[in-house]
Amino acid sequence: MSDLNDAQAMPWPYPVSYGKENEVRADVLVLGGGIAGCHAAVHAARRGAKVVVVDKGPVIRSGSGGAGVDHWHAACTNPCSKVTPDEMMEAVRVFGDYSYGEFGNGITSYIQCNESYDALMDVEKMGVKVRDVDDQFVGAEFRDGKTKLLFAYDYVNKTCIRVNGGAHIKVALYNELRRLGVQICDRIMVTSLLTEGGKQGARLVGATGVNVRTGEFYIFNAKTAILSMSVFAGQWVFSTELAGFGSIFNDPNNSGDGTAMAWNAGAELALMERSGRVLSSGFFRYPPYGTGDHNNTWFACTIVDANGKEIPYVDRDGNMLKTVSERYRPAPGQKFSLYGRMGDYSIWAPTLIPDLSERIAKGEYALPLYADLPGMPEHERRAIWGLMIYNEGKCSIIYENYCKAGFDPDKDMLQLPVMPPEQYGHGPAWETYGPRQWREGAFGGGGGIVFDWDLKSNIEGLYVAGSQQYSGGTHSHAAATGRYAGRKAASCARNANPGLIDRKQVAEEKARVYAPVMRNDGIGWKELRAGLCRIMQDYCGEFKSEQILQMGLRWIRSIRESEASTAFARNPHELCRILECQTHMTIGEIIMQASLARKASSLLLDFKRLDYPEPDPPEWNKIVTIRQENNSVKVGELPMRYWLLPPYAPSCEENYRKHCEL
């Protein structure tokens, strides 16, 4: 028995009613109240559907975008944009934030490029300050005088919008849900999907959940449902003392529950073998956005060395840039650029000299390096530190604490770490990595549910939005796909009858959920979670093989039958965490099964099979899918561009116009 469980538990502050049942009915059941879920609920409710939103946290701030957003990608339909959705779509699909290559999905990329600006206008109408209505940036190169929109990265083509009030976006969405009469079920962990007759792959009829404060059981009956519970996080990394729950960009509640319950219900999954050493990896990282940088939210900050010598910027063709203004412009002959140098040369943005690490080694520049905010033009300095740093994700905490501690961007510089170029590709960055075997699936992992042009899964009545989808994306992707899925689910619900819930399926789930609180002692959730991460590190790390993966599967099954079967909870919070550990076991098995199914290495997927070392052989230029049928794993495949093959039309525009239901 662990020290955690030996310790005297503090009195639980809420009344506990384990086993008490609550029944909730909906036309559209939205599972996950993050950015995608809220937009889905709003648009379903506006079409007359009775909508219920369920979230493990408080919807007013929950989700990966709950803390805010500073820049809105692929807003191609804004009145200042010089790039069309069709021109941007391939860049977003293949070379966007996550560099999916041909594994990127054209359906959601096209939806994002067509609807992300509309989604931004939605939240502006809800009260979010998007434009520079206070005229704080009059005269700035990135400000459009007529619309007062503020742009980021590419000041010529203007497809990415700075969000002036992005830190409060979830509050506005929450208030709109309340105004529309949407029923909000806060702090309820959804534990399973209910299907007709309790059969895998059958029509969806509802879901079950448990209140993480009171322990009460919930049975949701719905005509349709939208899964928008984000991707799994913390599968490889877990140390609450040093690294928290996992990904720096994700809500700590993102444990993969949606993916696991979809798998158990018979949903088809894709790209689950993809993982990588991404921004959430390692114990030793610096606070994200809390050190100097030149990328992303900090783009394109002036960087100097320890002696005050400025590090030059170059355009995509290696031409030295002499002014700050030039850093925000495409190279001569370049149609448009996205920030950084991920993906294809055609969209590379200006960056620091790519051989900086080598020049440091030769003594040309002296470490440490610093982000020279005081050396930036005033508008650019205030746009980075104040507008973007404050509004991006969890960074309002960094902004407020640094300011309280006396940091003054007009006078002070922030040090930035340097990462070897083989790890990141273009010089310094604000993130350091842990050991190479530590992986992460969230924020760029890519694995998730397969869907069609209606954003519907293979399970009748089950839709998917946001990064719950395979090849998920950014905040604006979640907003755009959420509003689209909300329309589709509401339309389906109008013509559907409520399904009958199978009481046997409910009883079995109820027994599983409450098993940990029926025990008096056993292993604690932290020990169980840490042990599962170790299994993933050792048996599903950077390098994989049939033998290693099979050993990993045996270990997870052994833990499920032994240690996990003795885990006990003293209160609903610990019950939630133990159920998350069960989710992590399921996700681990899915990842290993998908890794076994792809018998080829892949550079694009950062996938390395020791027993199949050849990267991306032509015969594996396909999407591997897996699902459960009668509790057996079924491996399938999809063509890379299945969304343009029969029965679909051969163009994204035609398919979108046919299905979008604007």
Image (cartoon, rainbow, N blue to C red):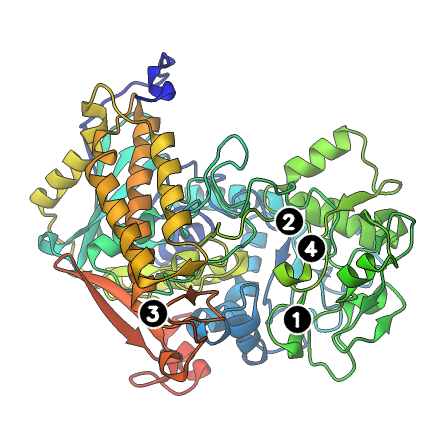
Asked if the residue under mark 4 is in contact with the one under mark 3, i.e. CB atoms within 8 Å, the reply is: no
Asked if the residue under mark 3 is in contact with the one under mark 2, i.e. CB atoms within 8 Å, the reply is: no
Q: CA distance from mark 1 to mark 3?
A: 44 Å
Q: Is disc 3 surrounded by few (<14), some (14 to 19) or many (20+) residues within 10 Å?
A: many
Report which residue position mark 3 lands on.
Answer: 598
Q: CA distance from mark 2 to mark 3?
A: 30 Å
Q: CA distance from mark 2 to mark 1?
A: 35 Å
Compared across the picture, whether 645 is left or right of 119 comes to left
Foreground label between 1 and 3: 3
Report which residue position mark 1 lands on.
Answer: 79
Q: CA distance from mark 1 to mark 4?
A: 13 Å
What secondary structure is found at the residue carrying circle 1?
A: loop
Quadrant location, the C terminus:
bottom left
| Residue nearer the viewer, 119 or 631 | 631
Q: Is disc 4 surrounded by few (<14), some (14 to 19) or many (20+) residues within 10 Å?
A: many
Report which residue position mark 2 lands on.
Answer: 431
What is the three-letter code of the residue carrying label 4?
Arg
Residue found at x 40% / y 66%: 609
Compared across the picture, whether 405 is left or right of 653 comes to right
User: Is the residue 127 above or below the residue 322 in the image?
Assistant: above
Report which residue position mark 4 lands on.
Answer: 131
What is the three-letter code of the residue carrying label 2?
Glu
Residue found at x 78% / y 73%: 315
Foreground label between 2 and 1: 2
Quadrant location, the N terminus:
top left
Q: Earlier in the sequence, mark 2 or mark 1?
A: 1
